[in-house]
Image (cartoon, coloured by chain):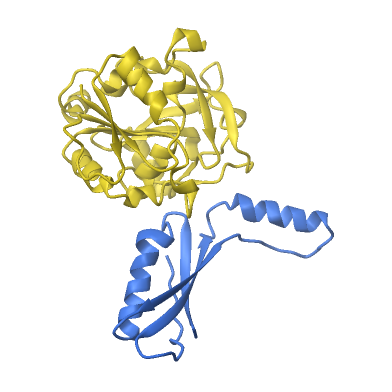
Chain colours: A blue, B yellow
């Protein structure tokens, strides 16, 4: 599993917004991505090398500081938002 | 044996399992609402098929965090019997009570067809009505039944003999065309190391009476309530 954390965006004190991106792991067959890839080819988009179909979540939360916010979102990803057997996730911080 | 069927919002095979356990096999059977925290002394806990929470996020992932699941986990860890059918199997994977995960079916279609299964273990109480190598016909009805795990984890699963059912053709042989959802190693059902937790995608409760034209699934539900006591000991004795 990979997790990248960019610098937290500035926001009101104690309030954070994370954007969590979840994708099928590279080595896991992604039938949805494959189907979309085929469809793009059929409607004339040449040169599409790969499509991976994933999900994104916006998590607005309150936390004492950046470190706690980051730690909480990471646990959310591991326990519910992503299934580590088949998915990787990344976390980006955005302004509210 | 006292049996409990956990009902989640979106369960739709709960009454089918109830019918077979209560009316066909004449077991004391009760429904357990997912927000309960007690299994009310049930020895067999069934997580039924359906679309719990509308399959939000990933099939079974929301149900895996329902209040009752803590009790189900304790029951399983103490050697109690837990059977997950279809969506119930997906829940067992999401809770980690069984290893692996489900992907969308290989061809992205919802599959509602009869499949053939080969029985890979007959030393478990679940399979006491079958012989190893028996070929059963059972219906499947799912969109996410494409079983996957890492290569090492699959090897470990095989080494420990945790694969209980595999998709095969009518002659009992594996072939890609018989593995409709694309599951790794044609896996249709697995158990935990102790043998007391079983999950499978096919629906034994839909083929447990002669009047339905097929009773191949009755053996599994009869096995689930056979013997009483703890299944873990049986599994250990059987290797």
Q: Can residue B20 be seen here? A: yes
Foreground residue among B49 and B226: B49
Residue A33 vs B161, above or below: the answer is: below
Location of residue B176 in the rendering, given as x and y in whole percent from the top left corner: 60, 32
The quarter holding residue A84 reads bottom left
Residue extending furthest toward the top = B210
Q: Residue at x 56, y 39 (%)?
A: B182
Q: Nearer the viewer, residue B203 or B233?
A: B203
User: Which one is nearer the viewer's eye here, B100 or A77?
Assistant: A77
A56 lies above or below B124: below
Apparent side of residue A72 relative to residue B13 in the rendered image (left or right): left
How many callouts does the rendering have?
A: 0
Measuring 46% from the left and 88% from the top, which residue is drawn there? Answer: A9
Instruction: Residue at 30%, 80% (x, y): give it.
Output: A68
Q: Is residue A9 left or right of residue A79?
A: right
The x and y percentages for residue B140 are: 52, 29
Give the residue at x 47% y 51%: B58
Seen as rendered, the residue at the extreme right is A44
* Quarter of image, res A60: bottom left
User: In which quadrant will I find the N terminus of chain A?
Assistant: bottom left
Residue B80, horizontal then vertical, whole percent = 20, 33
Q: Visible in this render: residue B220?
A: no
Residue B203 in the image: state x and y as whole percent. 45, 26
Residue A62 placement, left or right of B228: right
Q: Is residue A35 above or below residue B78?
A: below
């Amino acid at each position: 599993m990979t997790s990248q954390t960019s610098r937290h965006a500035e926001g009101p004190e104690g309030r954070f917004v994370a954007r969590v991106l979840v994708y099928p792991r590279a080595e896991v067959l992604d039938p949805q991505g494959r189907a979309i890839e085929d469809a793009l080819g059929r409607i004339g988009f040449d040169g599409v090398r790969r499509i991976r179909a994933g999900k994104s979540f916006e998590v607005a939360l309150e936390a004492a500081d950046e470190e706690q916010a980051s730690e909480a979102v990471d646990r959310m990803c591991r326990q519910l938002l992503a299934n580590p057997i088949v998915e990787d996730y990344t976390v980006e911080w955005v302004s509210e | 044996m006292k049996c409990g069927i956990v009902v989640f919002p979106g369960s739709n095979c709960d009454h089918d399992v109830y019918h077979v356990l209560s009316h066909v096999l004449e077991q004391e059977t009760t429904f357990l609402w997912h927000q309960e925290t007690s299994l009310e002394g049930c020895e067999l806990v069934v997580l039924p098929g359906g679309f719990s929470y509308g399959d939000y996020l990933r099939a079974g992932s929301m149900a895996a965090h329902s209040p009752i699941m803590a009790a189900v986990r304790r029951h399983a860890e103490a050697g109690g019997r837990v059977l997950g059918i279809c969506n119930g199997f997906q829940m067992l994977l999401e809770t980690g009570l069984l290893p692996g995960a489900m992907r969308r079916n290989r061809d992205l279609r919802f599959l509602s067809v009869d499949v053939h299964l080969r029985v890979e273990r007959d030393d478990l109480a679940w399979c006491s009505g079958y012989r190893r190598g028996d070929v059963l016909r059972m219906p499947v009805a799912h969109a996410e039944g494409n079983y996957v795990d890492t290569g090492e984890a699959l090897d470990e699963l095989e080494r420990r003999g945790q694969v209980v059912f595999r998709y095969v053709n009518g002659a009992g042989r594996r072939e890609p065309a018989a593995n409709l959802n694309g599951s790794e190693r044609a896996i249709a059902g697995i158990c935990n190391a102790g043998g007391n937790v079983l999950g499978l995608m096919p629906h034994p409760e839909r083929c447990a009476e002669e009047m339905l034209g097929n009773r191949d699934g009755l053996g599994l539900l009869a096995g689930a309530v056979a013997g009483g006591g703890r299944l873990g000991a049986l599994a250990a004795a059987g290797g």
